[in-house]
Amino acid sequence: MGVMPVGRLLFSMSLPMMLSMLVQALYNVVDSMFVSRVSEDALTALSMAFPIQNLMIAVAAGLGVGVNAVLSRALGAKDEQGVQRAAANGLLLEGIGAALFMIGGATIVRAFFEAQTDIAPIVESGVSYTRIVMIGCLGVFAQISFERLLQSTGRTVLTMVSQATGAIINIILDPIMIFGLFDMPKMGVAGAALATVIGQWIAAGLGLFLNLRYNKEVSLAPRGLRVHGETLRRILTIGLPSVVMQSIGSVMTFTMNQILIAFSSTAVAVFGVYFKLQSFVFMPVFGLNNGTVPIVAFNYGARRADRMQKAIRYTVIAAMTIMCAGLAIFQIFPAALLAIFDASDEMLRIGLPALRIISLSFPVAGFCIGCGSVFQALGYSVYSMVVSLVRQLFVLVPCAFLLGRLTGNVSSVWWAFVIAEVCSLLLTLVFFRRVNEKVIRPLG
């Protein structure tokens, strides 16, 4: 992390995570692809379940960002005790997060769906899917925890192995459990949820094994798992803004579902399909982000401003390149993308303009995500949180509501994404200049 040429280092750390996140994006799409064969109502139910699923990932991954930054900084400063404390207290926080969602899965799921729609098939499918995913969520929290520990010490290939294993198992089990192949009971939407949970638990077990076998810088021995208040504070200081930042997506999605259901349940299904498809574009950029955070944090701890600046520059260029490729695909092949989900004529009518309009914001989003990785690595995660708040809640949702209300046309709603991304770009530029002047430039 301190001596390899920065371009090669970023490539070697990010590529495995980008590939593994592409596999994760694939199994998200496969989930919805098979469920769409059950019924359009089942597909709509998964779209309405997305806010809770996203919230679980937001808490687990956001806390992981805090652990990643604190642990990597301790490695850069050669603070072995700090490394062990970061790992132990990070696992404690992830366990508490999982317990809260397990309780929620047993208590609030039906109320959550009934607040969104009174269409009985959608409610029943959504409750069945979400309850299983939430009660079994300890698997995904453990999986993300162990993968972040591997990332923090530069073992991103092992992270890819863990993530890809869970994803592939999910892909294999989906059709078997949904449609009842090989004499299995036909479980429908519940089968998709169970396949997801099984894949997460197996990936978590593999992640634990890989840490114990290969991650020698981090000890997971029970005697070393002690609560340390200052380490908890540091993890939460960096991690909570990241949790909030990613959780904002859940609030935005829930609110957008309410705006779109006023047009039709098909519009909600289209919105859910878009989120599955855009993950193929955004997930590699998030993988790049995850590779950048430990590099910038390590070299900040080592006081190497030159390496920090190169990592930032390469990250932003790569992120925007990926996003431009995504823009081209969404503009040229929207009908083929929607056909993956057995789209009806009505879904095509709503979905074609949706994909083409929203994708116009992709290149700008790539720049903002690249800069956001720097904020996280240097302890300024609150800047990323503010940018997300402004983009998704203060601009996107109000614009979507007003455009839909004023025009009465669902296609107008999609332009809110473009407007919101331009606003986030302006704010990101202001924050990045401030971080550069306060932190990066004084290092030399």
Image (tube, rainbow, N blue to C red):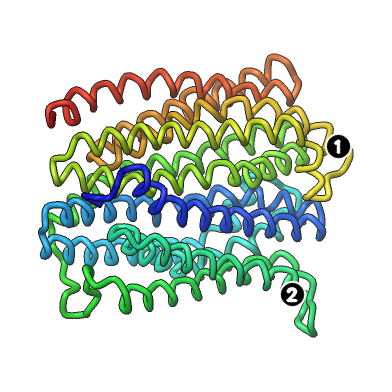
Q: From the viewer's perspective, is 40 left or right of 399?
A: right
The disc placed on residue 390 is none
Q: Which residue lies most toward the right here?
A: 345
State the image quarter where residue 242 is shown.
top left
Q: CA distance from mark 2 to mark 1?
A: 29 Å
| Residue type, mark 1 in image | Glu
| Residue type, mark 2 in image | Ile
- Residue at the location (44% across, 29% down)? 367
Q: From the viewer's perspective, is 340 left or right of 46?
A: right
Q: From the viewer's perspective, is 413 left or right of 184?
A: left
The disc placed on residue 176 is 2
Is residue 56 something one can see in this rendering? Answer: no
Is residue 224 something one can see in this rendering? Answer: yes
Residue nearer the viewer, 151 or 131: 151
State the image quarter where residue 325 is shown.
top right
Q: Are marks 2 and 1 in contact (CB under 8 Å)?
A: no
State the image quarter where residue 143 is shown.
bottom left
- Can you identify the residue that label 1 sits on? 346
2 or 1: tag closer to the N-terminus: 2
The percent position of residue 129, horizontal first and vertical second, equals 64, 63
The percent position of residue 430, horizontal first and vertical second, equals 32, 19
The 10 Å Cα crowd at callout 2, few under 14, some 14 to 19, many 20 or more, is: many
